[in-house]
Amino acid sequence: MRQLATFDARDSVATIVTAATILTVDQSQPTAEALLTHRGTILAVGTLDEVERAASEAGLTPERAEFPGATIVPGFIDAHAHPLMYGQMLTWVDVSPVKASSIPEIVELLGAAAEKLPAGVPLRGYGYEQRNLAERRHPTKEELDRVATDREVYIMNASGHGGVVNSFTFEKHGVTKETPNPEGGEFFRDAEGELTGELSDAACNVLTGLHGVKIGHHGPNFHLGDEPAEHQRQMELVQREFLAGGVTAIGDAQVSKRELETYLRFADSGEQRMRVSMYFLSHLLDHVIELGLTSPFGNAMLAHAGVKLYADGTLGGWTAYFPDGYVGDPCRTGQLYHQPQEYTELVRRAHLAGLQTATHAQSPIAIKMVVDAIEAALAERPDKDARHRIEHCGLPYPAEIARMAELGIRPVNQTQHYYNWGEGVEQAIGTPGERFNPLGEFAEAGVAMTISSDAPVAEPRPLEAIQAAVTRVTRRGAKLGPDGLRISAEQALRAHTLEGAVSIGRDNELGSLEAGKRADFAVLAENPLTVEAGTIASIRVLETWVDGKVAFSADV
């Protein structure tokens, strides 16, 4: 019988770890001088004398790991990320605003990359954000035709919910101007009805090829396949990126067969160093229930957590549902992935089976649909610890925030979204956009918040996310909304550690530095609670420890 490999700490020696400050995120003991680890577990936390006494009483002769001047925090939990998608992006052409500020610059970057590829190999790019381009629009298929007319060319929008292809791609997959839009997606057309090259959400199913992962209208299809060895390499690249940010555990917020197969190979290789909790996409709900994966399953490194659903699209790609149209383009209304009755039934079936749900929802109407469905499910089968999640939860009505508090619904926010593109949200929908991710309102209402990256939409840099939550100042220096939308550094640290662990159902072992929990922590050059708020993102992660061992060092 095949067994999953895991990060084996059974033969590890005991270690006493000291630092200038240890922020435990444990309300009963917020700070400490030292902690004792053994076999991947924290045995004691407190003063150095207390920890040394605990080691002696346990008959241990510990090694020392001293970090004078540094601050230790629990390993960050990135409860919503897309690791394999991120890994692919790291191997694609970077056409983000840092690299390209105009469409000709995108074309130039792609052209240079095309010259290095064997004939016929698809060319893929990632990261453009149309509002950040000089032209303030998406490229067209004709502009990508300048790159190649004999191979697929696809550039993915920074939102991950679509992008632009060249004419060859449409021809290869049989998409013409007469091709109807699939449910949950769109092939965009100009005023004359001609394809522009832009496609979104479920329309991206065509890009996965004849035998690729098909997810219907259950979400954006970014599950483009590569050879197993290439996916393994991508996971190794991604793991280092997460660990370099101090992240020790993640929630993969859209798992299909592609991701599961890759994780099994990665775990089996013995190279896995970050913990993964998987959320299977809702098109697999019947399979998950039929297999009985409705209770905690897996091991300390790879586990199943719940099911991922979509209510609407994305603000970045203007597919979040605003039936009155976008200020930036009144002809665009976005979409709901499911009609309310269908969505409510999906949530009901998942909840009755004992599954945690995590639903992507951005617009006020979509968020209300999610809250309504969860309320109905909880009325049928009450559960005070269901921990149903709303991913992104960008622009909730105040009334829905109050209901979320009452029902125990957990928003999983990405403050780096407004750090990177906050101005774009206001351009898209007007002044209501300044409330995007209203963490201060959540805190005021008693709603427990989780902060995550949504990598690759943002890089897994928790300290950058914490800074954005505390300041609400964008990368370009604009303040997004009033001070009431901000939260404190203490709240933000908790949101990216313990609350993240709660959101993935692992707070009994992760998220805070307490005796009995796993020895996962990050060593920071400075204290994020005492430095000037606008400098939190610049704090260096010196080391990241998993199971009481160094998994990343900035010096290596």
Image: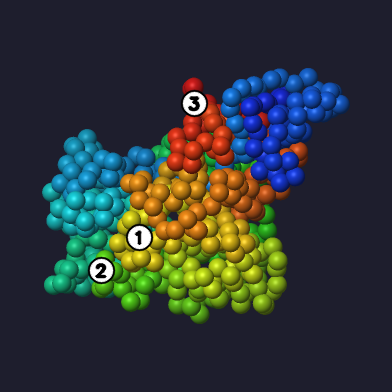
| Cα separation between marks 2 and 3 | 45 Å
- Element assignment for label 1: helix
Tell me if residue 10 comes above or below residue 370 in the rendering: above
Q: Which residue type carries mark 1?
A: Val
Query: Image point 37% across, 55% down: which residue?
Result: 422
Residue placed under numbered mark 2 in the picture: 329
Residue 517, disc = none
- Element assignment for label 2: loop
> Along the horizontal axis of the image, is 218 left or right of 136?
right
Where in the figure is residue 250, as x and y percent of width and height? 55, 46
Q: Which of disc 2 and disc 1 is earlier in sequence?
A: 2
| Cα separation between marks 1 and 2 | 12 Å
Q: Is residue 92 visible?
A: yes
Where in the figure is residue 479, as x and y percent of width and height? 39, 52
Which residue occupies the foreground of this view, 88 or 489? 489
The image quadrant that residue 296 belongs to is bottom right
- Element assignment for label 3: loop
Tell me if residue 544 comes above or below residue 484 in the rendering: above
Q: Are marks 1 and 3 in contact (CB under 8 Å)?
A: no
> Along the horizontal axis of the image, is 15 left or right of 374?
right
Query: Image point 15% across, 53% down: which residue?
Result: 143
Where in the figure is residue 12, as x and y percent of width and height? 70, 26
Which residue occupies the foreground of this view, 310 or 485? 485
Residue placed under numbered mark 3 in the picture: 554
Q: Which is closer to the viewer, label 2 or label 3?
A: 2
Tell me if residue 351 comes above or below residue 528 in the rendering: below
| Cα separation between marks 1 and 3 | 35 Å
The image quadrant that residue 315 belongs to is bottom left
Q: Are marks 1 and 2 in contact (CB under 8 Å)?
A: no
Q: Which of disc 3 and disc 1 is earlier in sequence?
A: 1
